[in-house]
Image: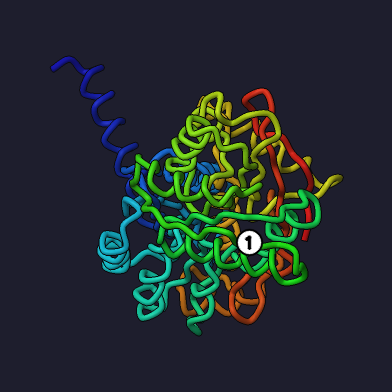
Amino acid sequence: MPATIKLITAASSIAFMLTSQAHAQDLLVKIGHVSPLSGPSAHMGKDTEEGARMAIDELNQKAISIGGKKARFELLAEDDAGEPRQATTVAQKLVDAKVNGVIGHMNSGTTIPSSKIYHDAGIPEISPSATNPKYTQQGFKTAFRVVANDGQLGGTLGRYAVQIQHAKNIAVIDDRTAYGQGVADEFIKGATAKSSFTKIVSRQYTTDKATDFSAILTTIKAANPDLIFFGGMDAVGGPLLKQIKQLGLKARFMGGDGICSTELAQLAGDAIGEGNVVCAEAGGVEEGKKEGLDRFKASFSKKFGHEVVLNAPYAYDGVMTLVAAMQKANSAEPARYLPELAKIKYKGVTGDISFDARGDIRDGTLTLYTYKNGKRELIAVTR
């Protein structure tokens, strides 16, 4: 072997050894992330994962020290397919991998059963999107969320339907998931609480995988509603809107954050209409505070080649909030930084983040949207 090649080989070996030694001295911080990466809501689950991944990449570009060691962050992303049984399986997998914290799950129906597994292991969990109130009503000190819950979201939509859209006869459909049923129930409470003139003329049920709605829509058409509320996800909401149009139903359409994605217009096609659909995102930034969120969205689009679908900013903030608590505690050990997380005050791209005693975000905002020209359009940000 020529001498020059020997020298290069020796130098490469030394460099590898030095790099390996440096990494050995680093503090490896493993952040779990769970969302549906397969199934009908995979596009939303991938969006959430990409938000978390963006945070991890940015953290690794910074010289962050925790407990006197350089922190190196790793994202362990799992797919729960939106199924509760699979969710608990991957939750246990993350616990066995000794993750330092978890961002997820995306759906209420997967977050609620998984939260007990993280609680029993003492691992903090921040959901970027689960809105069912039951998640934080279980008494688990490890459970947090960075979005408003269904009581706030559904109630606001119910009041909006009556006070702004002057709905009198309302039909309600939900997909029987923890999320869909929860937000529909809260919508009904909000719509009927202060109006003796508003009636729920039909309450119907579907599933989160349904494609044929002819039977329930025929029943609803006979009730002649002026508004239809749907508790479910955009993958069902889009085809539902198409069949509403095909049946000649003229009712306005409303839903929660599950349908409130940039993808809904594509899924519904021309059935989206012009200002006919109103939905609410469980979060949002008020006017005058949007600069950080706008920067995030621009960076996200540049990094991944597409726009934010819905929950990516909340997953991003979830990761950053976990790490901020670790820095305050000077430890990535869950038991050490959990008390700091409970009292954190963090300024995120989605607004100021702090939690109440249950783990719900304080003063959570809601963003109302409609759809015009095939695009989601802001109506207002409210609390």
Identify the image quadrant of the N terminus: top left
Between residue 356 and residue 11, name the one nearer to us: 356
How many numbered dots are placed on residues in this image? Answer: 1
Q: Is residue 111 above or below residue 73?
A: below
Which residue in the structure is indicated by mark 1? 154
Side of 166 where 204 appears, left or right? left
For the residue pair 190 and 83, the one nearer the viewer reads as 190
The percent position of residue 376, horizontal first and vertical second, equals 66, 33
How far from the left and from the top, in percent, is residue 122?
Answer: 41, 78
Q: Residue furthest front?
A: 222
Above/below status of 358 relative to 218: below
On the question of residue 28 being in view, the answer is no
Identified at 62% across, 32% down, the residue is 299
Residue type pointed to by label 1: Gly
- Residue displayed at 47% across by 44% down: 53
Examine the rendering and report whether any part of residue 95 can be seen: yes
Mark 1 residue element = helix
- Name of the residue lying farthest toward the bottom: 139
- Quarter-of-image position of residue 25: bottom left
Q: Is residue 174 left or right of residue 94?
A: right
